[in-house]
Image (tube, helix red, strand yellow):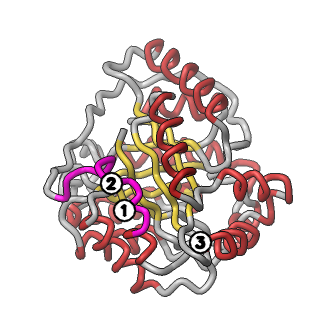
Amino acid sequence: MEIGVGLPGHVTGVEERTLVTWARRAEERGFASLIASDRLAWSTPEPLITLAAAAGATERIRLVTSVLLAPLHTNPALFAKAAATLDRIAGAGRLHLGLAPGAREDDYRASHLDFSTRGRALDTLVERVTAIWRGEEEVGPAPVTPGGPPLWFGGTSKATLRRIASHGTGWIAGTGGDIDEFTTFATRLHSRWKEAGRQGRPRTRATAMFALGGHAHRSLARAVNDYYAFAGPDYVRTVIDTAATTADVIHATVTAHEAAGLDELVFVGNHTDPEQIDLLADILGDKLTSPNSTTTAPDRSHRRNQDAERVEPLHRPLP
């Protein structure tokens, strides 16, 4: 199992240039991936621009959106161009696009878009963008990764299963879910993947909140309460209670996800100090990849599935 680190972009008051320092430090310490989240009606830095800055400061580490609120990008050609440009800046195989409809109505109000049709909007965007990356329309530049950056999808609905089986490399599980929920959905995903005639197997990636040091619990509680307030106090408490704030919890979290067959676990920062990366890396030790290892593009063979499943609302675990 690989281990990545998530940028603290959701933490109120984060300075954008600090995120570039996080990117450099994450690569130096051997993390497999750098994750950028997405919100519109929040202070979170725009993820594609953030990862472009990270790409210029790094050479090996994967760059992942987790998750990008794709339905907010209402011009598929422009989105395809932006993502392909970032793919070329980063180099083949480094950029992975995690996409989802999102669960927060305020992001759609800010865009003057219909929240209730976000699932259909995501499907339409994916169809058009992948067609552009295949060269079916005169939109450039072409991505350097053959067929375009690997697509990952978040959510736990039937529509998520369909999207992954039709277009995806894998599934991004949200924060706050337990191992049993992960295993249940992963089993359904493997079955749907085979039914679609896909080769190999779907990949899986999950996130876990972390904060380390004397200030850890206070900074974590503040960040989670701010960011997930819309989901209610029970969900906020679940995220805080399952977060990693000690070495013992980090080791236990890694062990549990390894046993469940996860491909990559991402620890998302909840304090903006880049020292958080060093504290985390020191605990993980040889669980991290070598800083000199290289990133390879996964198998992304596709076989389109034209079934007409109902697009269901995104529900736990949340992106």
Displayed quadrant of residue 313? top right
Residue 282 has which mark? Answer: 1
Q: Nearer the viewer, mark 2 or mark 3?
A: 2
Q: Position of residue 105 (x, y in %)?
A: 76, 61
Q: Are marks 1 and 3 in contact (CB under 8 Å)?
A: no
Image-based side of 236 in relation to 264, left or right: right
Q: Nearer the viewer, residue 214 or 275?
A: 214
Q: For the residue marked with disc 1, what is the amino acid?
A: Asp
* Location of residue 13 with respect to 217 vertically, above or below: below
Which residue shows up at 56% across the image and 61% down it? 210
Characterize the local packing of mark 1: few (<14), some (14-19) or many (20 or more) Cα atoms within 10 angstroms: few
* Location of residue 48 with respect to 315 vertically, above or below: below
Q: For the residue marked with disc 3, what is the amino acid?
A: His
Magenta stretch, residue numbers = 279-291
Q: Position of residue 255 (x, y in %)?
A: 48, 37
Q: Position of residue 83 (x, y in %)?
A: 34, 60
Q: Write down the residue under mark 3.
A: 10
Image-based side of 94 in relation to 197, left or right: left
Q: CA distance from mark 2 to mark 3?
A: 27 Å
Q: Nearer the viewer, mark 1 or mark 3?
A: 1
Helix, strand or loop at mark 3: loop
Image-based side of 24 in relation to 103, left or right: left
Q: Nearer the viewer, residue 189 or 107?
A: 189
Q: For the residue marked with disc 2, what is the amino acid?
A: Gly
Q: Are marks 1 and 2 in contact (CB under 8 Å)?
A: yes
Q: Write down the residue under mark 2.
A: 285
Which residue shows up at 16% across the image and 51% down it? 293
Image-based side of 33 in relation to 158, left or right: left
Helix, strand or loop at mark 2: helix
Characterize the local packing of mark 2: few (<14), some (14-19) or many (20 or more) Cα atoms within 10 angstroms: few
